[in-house]
Image (cartoon, helix red, strand yellow):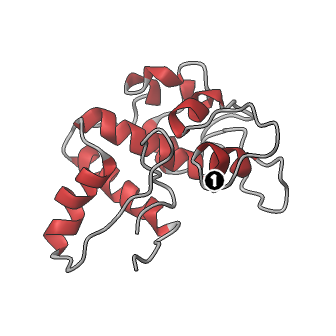
Amino acid sequence: LPHALNSLSKSLVGLLARQLILEGRIDACAPVVRYLPELKGSAWADATVQQTLDMTTGVRYEEDFGNPASGVFQYLTAAGLVPPPTGHAGPSSLLAYLPTVGKSSEHGERFQYKSVDTEVMSWLLQRVTGKRLSDLLSERLWMPLGAGEDAYVWSDGSGAEVASVGIS
């Protein structure tokens, strides 16, 4: 059985991002919307790539698993990782959900653990390279490591890969 890496998945996305920054394919100081114009009306509209990597964005989102109204449950529902609540009319995919996330504070002020920042970075990596996250992981990490077993990346109902917790 595949072993879910859960939040360790975030570190692998960060490693891929760092490789592409060092190669000059991504500018860490650039606004996220340079690469993802779909996020123009979202919290990431004025966030930099580095702030997103550092999880210092002022995104209106909390990972409070004790509060069903917390952003983490909206994220998990969109990703298909928890069943939608009765009457759910919100986004049903990651790429539909992320543009709806608003801003609550200035970027760069403080670190706050946010899975959604990793999902944005994964989308950005895929946009820059034209490759799926699973292919990037395979080509840049898994194969060079000489891994003896295949890895898997979960995907939502639309086929978007779940980057922050979905690597097994």
Where is residue 116 shown, x and y percent of the image?
Answer: 57, 46
Residue shown at the point (38%, 55%) measured from the top left:
13
**Looking at the rendering, in which quadrant would you find the C terminus?**
bottom left
Residue shown at the point (40%, 45%) measured from the top left:
122
| 13 vs 121: above or below | below
Q: How many marks?
A: 1
Is any part of residue 28 visible from this angle? no
| 120 vs 161: above or below | above
In this view, the residue in front, 108 or 75, is: 75
Residue shown at the point (67%, 55%) measured from the top left:
82
In this view, the residue in front, 98 or 121, is: 98
Is any part of residue 32 visible from this angle? yes
| Snapshot quadrant of residue 66 | bottom right
Residue shown at the point (67%, 38%) measured from the top left:
59
Q: Residue furthest front?
A: 86
Where is residue 113 shown, x and y percent of the image?
Answer: 63, 56
